[in-house]
Amino acid sequence: MTKTAVIGTTSWGTTLATILAKTSEVFLCCRTEEEAITLNKERQNNRFLPDISFPDELTATSSYKDALMNIDMLVIAVPSNTFRQNVISVIPYLPDQCVILSATKGLEVTSNQRMTEVLEDELPSKLKDTLAVLSGPNLAKEISLDMPSSTIVASSNKEVALRIQSLFNSETFRVYTSDDVVGVELGGSLKNIIAIGAGISDGLGYGNNSKSAFINRGLVEITRLGIALGAKPLTFFGLAGLGDLVATCYSPLSRNRYFGEKIGNGDSAVKTLSSMENVVEGVNATSSAVSLAYNLGVSMPVTNSINQILLGNITPTEAISRLMARIPSEEWLGIG
């Protein structure tokens, strides 16, 4: 039987572990021994994913040595701001060969790097050909309830992508493959920015016309930046782009959309963040995207406006007014 380790006990990491435990022996890595004991005793993650029972093949542990010994695949599903440190921590325990899958949808704010770039920075050369990323319209709660869902796995190594596909694919979780690692990662990271904006629109009480236009213009900006960074344009119209964008911008389960809605209601970004237990990846992604766009000369007025709102420099209504007052242009300017 395949042996897999998952780092990250949030709703997403726990969901991925329960999926894999249907076909693999899975170790869910915890930060403390106390957490591991609690999860094994209760056989569910009551903090982040209540009422979803662990399969028999899933074991929680705080020991990297036990979890990573002779593993076939390592899944990393932690926030982007702790991703690098988690990678550094596991390196001494990794076998000479194993697949390493990033399931984190974010950019490292200190370097503006994607998670596979962080992995390439830190991992030994012998493991750099086994990297992959998983992304798509993947709301953890829905997947954990076996609602039909799809995702995409991207890797420059086709055999690695196919191997991961075979481990995750099921009757309720359909997995597609891609070789566009850059596009799939950026789609999953940058859509969080637009979800914050969609939430702001909801909080302001605007209708579906406003929100749909906002999502469309956001998709254009994501695609522009993605192309400038080497991604394939079509990727942003697939599961990792448009698919994930729609799910995140409309679902009440989306923490980025919820965060934006609170801002639209008049709360500050700082106050809202302090009240939320889960990480809002779109906040750091916004800062990174603005920096990347500036350096590459990419026009991203929507993203810049959201950044100014988060910094407290303008109000949401002022931002909308400024966006609407811009000189009209071609719809797909800067693409194609």
Image (cartoon, helix red, strand yellow):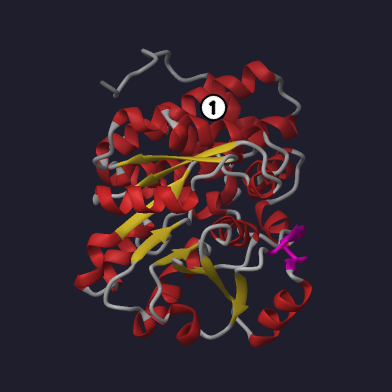
Q: State whether the magenta stretch is mostly helix, strand or loop.
A: strand
Looking at this view, name the residue that lies furthest to the front.
1
What residue is at 62 percent from the left and 46 percent from the top?
256
Q: Is 85 above or below relative to 333?
A: below
**Which amino acid does the dot numbered 1 rest on?**
Ile
Residue ID for mark 1: 215
Question: What secondary structure is found at the residue carrying circle 1?
Answer: helix
- 139 w.r.t. 27: above or below: above
| Residue 107 placement: quadrant | bottom left
Residue 237, image x, y percentages: 41, 27
- Magenta stretch: residue 52 in it? yes
Identified at 61% across, 74% down, the residue is 59
Residue depicted at 35% across the width and 18% down the height: 332
Residue 53 at what x, y percent from top left? 74, 61
Q: Please provide percent x and percent y for residue 42.
A: 78, 73
Instruction: State left or right for residue 335 relative to residue 195.
Output: left
> What stretch of residues is rendered in magenta?
44-54
Compared across the picture, whether 318 is left or right of 159 comes to right
Depth check, front residue: 322 or 271: 271
Out of 49 and 111, give the one closest to the viewer: 49
Q: Nearer the viewer, residue 283 or 106?
A: 106
Residue 36 seen from this side: yes
Quarter of the rendering occupied by the C terminus: top left
Asked if residue 209 is positioned above or below residue 82 in the image, the reply reads above
